[in-house]
Image: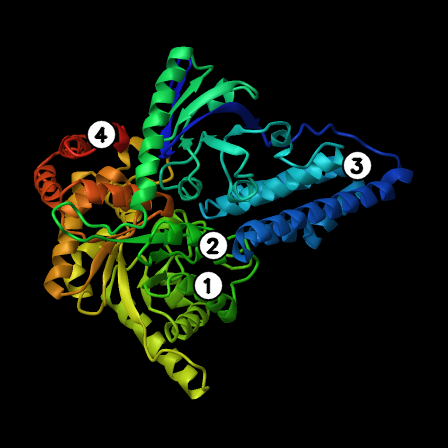
Amino acid sequence: MMTGRLLRGVGVSPGIALAPAVVLEWRFPEVPDRSVGPAEVEGEVRRLHEAVGAVAEYLNMLRERVLHRAGLEESRIFEAQIMMVQDPDFLASVEHLIRKNNLSAETAFEFKALELRVAFQGTSNLRMRERLADLSATQIRVLRHLMGRSDDELAALREHDHVIVVAHELSPGLTVQLDRDQLLGLVSEEGTRTSHAAILAHSLGIPAVMGAVGALDRIKSGSLILIDGQTGTIRMDPTPEELEVAKAQATRRHKLDLELEGASMSPAVTPDGEAITLMGNVDLPDEIELAVRHGAQGVGLLRTEFLVTGRANLPTEDEQLEYFRRVGAAFPNHVVVIRTYDLGGDKFPAAFEAPTEANPFLGWRSIRVCLDHPEIFRPQIRAMLRIAAERKIRVMLPLITRVDEVTASKALVEEEAAKLKAAGIRAAETLEIGVMVETPASVVMADRLARVAAFFSVGTNDLTQYTLAVDRGSAQLAGRFTPLDPAVLRQLVAVRQAATRAGIPVSVCGEMASDPLSALMLIGMGYDTLSVAPPTLPMVKWLVRQVPASVCRAAAAKALEADSPEAVAAILRQAAQGHVDKRLLGP
């Protein structure tokens, strides 16, 4: 929403940032139709291959840079792009067009590139979005190279010391290239609190506003902008008065940061003596150190999808073991909960043949893919069994809707454990297997699932999406996507009660646990284990130490009688304000 110099979006990562904007307009260049003489044709073919070679070399350089900065797994996002740019069938079709119609390399390339993009878009498959973004990125690079332009979408950043990047959409490939010392904030027209880019920004501690429709039209490169990643506001050319308000906010935040720093290694115990276990969510390798530094009591959600996203093939058993070993070594005295592949939606390796679906997020994904393709699942099970012989490991199954999905998974674990034992490979005899409760079906079946699960962990992102019929990635519906909706809260109560009756542990590992107000609600509902984004650990721990559990329980009881998420938030803010500055708890 736009009002004068004010632009509103969704605050996805808290913090204040003031800096010149750098608008990234990474779009297809205008390519003129150009014919060449017969004698020039082979020269155009050579120019095509030179451009492809240069782009592949550049992508490989990016892969190496990311390898050193973020690790092997994150660097593999560029492997698929390198494969795309060097696709022999596609290049042969461009060569044929150059020779048949005497076209310039860029004219022929653009024609075939458009043809391929139309084919991708025509699948009606949402999971192709990420592949289409990678395809477009490589094609833009080749065209710009052929036309004598820079093929580096971040070239503009090198002209500035500190900037706020403004883009239509932040792709994973773009995000991993950003220099975190130079980058003060992010603004994106697309995205919501639970989009991948938002979670990544939150994990890195970068102030970010997403869903800012119209940002590219309103914000010019070089203009001074002020963003608030908590309230979701963007002020263009802020006035002295607005800067003073921001300065006061930043001062409050700085004072809080000093308190948070002191709280990081303190026990998470409420003023009335109730201990809360705070674990960390780990999505990317560079979050491991941050979780340790902020005092995480283990890992409550170790995502494994980044091991496959954007790469040509699935990781081997040994590759997975090595990563699990790295995480386990960082938390030698605590539990690490590994979530099995949540494949599907937009998370398939490039070479994986998956069916076209009108709505893949309600289709063939997660545990369904793993059970239908045990050749994918078994290597991961073997890696988890092997690490479980060395460390405290639990395994969590995503998107469970049926009891037999759990029993079938346990049967595969038993088979692989027997094989490892017969081969003389050191491994655990079994795995402690729990259920990620993230569908209304798993809530309804919680009493039955508790008979076969060792623990529950609530994934509030998908549970909110499926309960409210709101796409978590939709900027237009961002205001409707909230886990504080009474329909979601009632399910959270039901899950906790089912776990308590069955005598199994229960926790929350979704983004809800990372939100200050929501964390207080969860504690009030009886959840004593939360797994949160590493940058949020100090804030949640500080809140735990400030607000008595009895206050949380009283507020939760009242909130559960409310009819709207706005009423719930108001009740929680009122309860907290007697103990903390409510301005620190979000809008």
Residue drawn at (42%, 11%) of the image: 239
Name the amino acid, label 4.
Lys
Residue ID at (79%, 36%) = 104
Rounded to the nearest angstrom, the CA distance separating label 2 from label 1 is 9 Å
Q: Which mark is residue 326?
A: 1
Alpha carbons under labels 1 and 3: distance apart = 52 Å
Please tell me which residue is depicted at 52% across the width and 39% down the height of the picture: 180
Tell me which numbered mark, 1 or 4, is placed earlier along the sequence.
Answer: 1
Residue at label 4?
582
Q: Position of residue 409 (x, y in %)?
A: 32, 70
Q: Which residue is mark 3?
A: 103
- Please tell me whether mark 4 sits on a helix, a strand or a loop: helix
Disc 3 element: loop
**Residues under labels 1 and 4: Cα distance?**
39 Å
**Quarter in which the C terminus is drawn:** top left
User: Which sits earlier in the primary sequence, circle 2 or circle 3?
Assistant: 3
Residue at mark 3 to residue at mark 4: CA–CA distance: 65 Å
Image mark for residue 285: 2
Q: Are marks 2 and 1 in contact (CB under 8 Å)?
A: yes
Q: Quadrant of the N terminus?
A: top left
Task: Report whether 545 appears left or right of 471.
Answer: left
The residue lying furthest to the right in this view is 39
